[in-house]
Amino acid sequence: MTDVGRVVLVGAGPGDPDLITVRGAKALAAADVVLYDQLATGDLLDLAPARAERINVGKRGHEEPTRTQDDINALIVERARAGRTVVRLKGGDPFVFGRGGEEVSACAEAGIPFEIVPGVTSAIAAAAYAGIPVTDRRHSASFAVVTGHKDPSKAAEQTRWRELGRAVDTLVILMGMRNLAGLVDELLAGGKSPDTPAAAVMQGTLPQQRTVTSTLGGICAAVAEAGLRAPSAVIVGDVVGLRVGLSWWEKQPLFGRRVLVTRAKEQAAELSAALRARGAIPVVRPMIELSPVEADEDRAAIEDAIANLARYTALVFTSSNAVRFFAEACRQGPEIAPRTRVFCVGDATARAALDAGLPVHLVASGRSDAEALLARLLPALDGPDERVLIPRSRIARTVIADGLEAAGVAVDSIAFYDNRRPEVDDGALRAELVAGELDALTFSSPSTVDHFLAGLDDASREAAGRVMIAAIGRTTARHLDRVGLPATVVAARPDAESMAEALVAASARGA
């Protein structure tokens, strides 16, 4: 009989994937199965192993689900009984109007071990991202969170709105947009002043966030005029007045800007997070797909290099991808000779090497390109007494290998991985460009540029030339110049944070 598995109920947070808890992220990383609501983001699902089964149960707040709650409970129990670790990923906090109690009750009744990982609830987070603290000793010493959904359950029917409006200083209403007019009428009928400050926050914590403020008597008209809809949180109370001085999220330098991210899927998350932190909307369209080389002669060259690592006096890495594929080829982990030195282009590559268990002896920072590393390598290597291994992609430049060989250094420049154009919805990309729906384009290598251009027609290419363009380094910038799409900005360092900061600086200049 298969040993029973376990269930981890994880709160996904209010929308921004960076607000997942550390424990929640660890649970996803160990999942065999992820059952997720429609509100969960792809960034969170990417935290689960590639082998994990992903099941969309379709629930979006209290709207009609694709699966009933009983079906979801049965699915959780079924997968866990098969001996699998099941993560049930729910928006916000699973115990705040999320039916999390029902789901773990089903586990308890079935004798299945479970764990509960609380999440950041939108009741507090949406208000905070709008610059509204739910409590503040100058204005509010209490708050209540209430569902505004007309649920047929007895508990919801007995919500005494008139008394509730007088009982607490701040009232947060979730899932109440459909019934907002009726709820406001109840609060007013209970004696709540129509002049009480009120706000509605749609898609709180996301770069698409929209906030309107008014009074309790005017909030319905303000919401209708602004076109706000679910998912939204409504906040009623004097604390709403603090938004004037505390609004911060919507003032982020790239707020609401749509930025194309062309990095490989495995690397897109870092740049996406850096952009989101500055208020941008990452539009992820990977233009590179990386995979280990498959040709027999390539595999033979790799096997020979790995089997004879002790003969190399230096390893040279020009990207974090080169580190990753080298480490994967080593299987048991890279074991280099004590005399072997490791040289890296840029801090990101150096961090990848250290994470792989390799020592790092020299990092070419500053310009952070192959030419810069070559200039540092030549005086550090002792000509004919050296033998250097350069793991690379099949289409990588040969600047370093050529320069070292010209100086009399023995070099094995070996392709460890292929760089291909993935499947791209070129039609959608062209339409977005022509419609002006992309505010900036980011490129992390000449390959991303070429693969991007391969899907364009004349109209979309012309549109691309009118958009802010960011290059991760000088090599990519030079290639953009060659193809007639000059970079607006070039990152000071070849990493995600620097790329995002370059876009911020360009935006401030009005570039």
Image: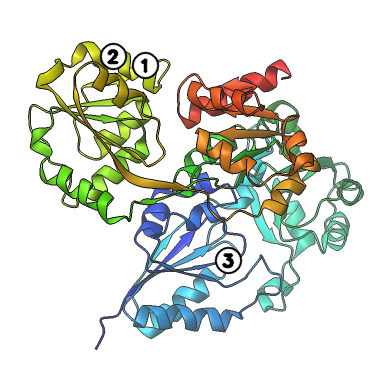
Q: In this view of the protein, which residue sits in the foreground, 66 or 359? A: 359
User: Badge 2: how crowded within 10 Å, few (<14), some, or many (20+)?
Assistant: some
Check the image and report above or below for 111 versus 255. below
Q: Quadrant of the C terminus?
A: top right
Q: Which residue is mark 3?
A: 37
User: Badge 1: how crowded within 10 Å, few (<14), some, or many (20+)?
Assistant: some
Give the SS element for disc 2.
helix
On screen, residue 335 versus residue 407, left or right, reads left
Of callouts 1 and 3, which one flags the residue occurring earlier in the amino acid sequence?
A: 3
- Residue drawn at (70%, 45%) of the image: 169
Q: Which residue is mark 2?
A: 376
Q: Which residue is mark 1?
A: 372
Outermost residue, bottom direction? 1
Q: Position of residue 430 (x, y in %)?
A: 73, 47
Of callouts 3 and 2, which one flags the residue occurring earlier in the amino acid sequence?
A: 3
Q: Amino acid at mark 1?
A: Ala
Q: Are marks 1 and 2 in contact (CB under 8 Å)?
A: yes
